[in-house]
Amino acid sequence: MRLLLLGHGRMGKLVEALAPEYGASVAGVVTTRDAALALSDRDFGAVDVAIDFTLPAAVPTNLPMLAARGLNVVIGTTGWAAHERAMRAVAARTNIGVLAAANFSLGMNLFQLVVEDAARRFARHESFGAWIHELHHAAKKDAPSGTALQLKAGMVDAGYVRPVDVSSARVGSIPGTHLVGFDGPSDTVTLTHTVRDRAVFARGALEAARWLKGKQGWFTMRDMLEALDSPQRSRGGLPGEGS
């Protein structure tokens, strides 16, 4: 598998370093600053999947240019949700595969399922309110995180229709911590996911790239995990199928 890396910050460098463990080589590296010129002019040779860990504002520009090259794309950048509908249309029109996720940690994606189950149960008890608090390093641009918003959306979809207070902290070098709480008149239940090493995100992105190779459609990590659990689904969906 040959990869094109967009963004060469901490995440991009981790993906590059870990790629050989996943049978992958890096065909090229594009920095956020030169992405537009590089994607329009540079020849990277054969590429199977692009992995984008750039900036929120860059995704709506990068994806159409990658699609024009016929490249499948793993998007690890967050904060561009306002453009998702337009980006889905690009993917459908060009018949590429896209896997976009707010968080590539396998543990977090399982945590999402646990939180949704808890929300479904607490939804029946009106005396319990809910909250989400997330902590990330000081350099993270978006707040709340895409993962926190995904957790909240999952809670709502699970039937928790009361307000969910969401707060954020940006401090130091915290890789990522998400706390979900349910508070009643006399007790509190909290669920916590803590990342100890940013490599978990790079490994998840590489797993996603390996799975996405040759597929068409728009997918999430949940789609990938469900497909891996059900081999008959592993061939992917048509454009617009998936989540």
Image (cartoon, rainbow, N blue to C red):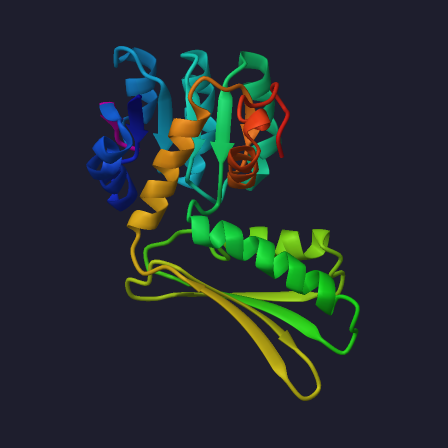
* Picture quarter with the N terminus: top left
Q: Is residue 112 above or below residue 168?
A: above
| x and y, in percent, of residue 5 in the image | 29, 29
Question: Looking at the image, can residue 172 be seen?
Answer: yes
Q: Is residue 138 left or right of residue 169?
A: left
**Residue depicted at x 30% and y 24%:** 4
103 or 68, which is in the foreground?
Answer: 103
222 or 55, which is in the foreground?
Answer: 222
**Residue depicted at x 64% and y 73%:** 182
- Examine the image and state in which quarter residue 135 appears: bottom left
* Picture quarter with the C terminus: top right
| x and y, in percent, of residue 31 in the image | 26, 31
Q: How many labels does the image show?
A: 0
Per the image, is 167 magenta?
Answer: no
Residue at the bottom extreme of this rendering = 186
122 or 59, which is in the foreground?
Answer: 122
Question: Looking at the image, can residue 87 be seen?
Answer: no
Judged by its main secondary structure, the magenta piece is strand
**Residue depicted at x 55% and y 33%:** 227
| x and y, in percent, of residue 63 in the image | 45, 24
Q: Is residue 16 left or right of residue 39?
A: left
Q: In this view, does 184 lie above or below 140?
A: below
Q: In this view, does 3 lie above or below 52?
A: above
Start and end of the magenta stretch?
27-32
**Residue depicted at x 48% and y 67%:** 192
| x and y, in percent, of residue 150 in the image | 57, 50
- Examine the image and state in which quarter residue 155 appears: bottom right
- Examine the image and state in which quarter residue 76 appears: top left
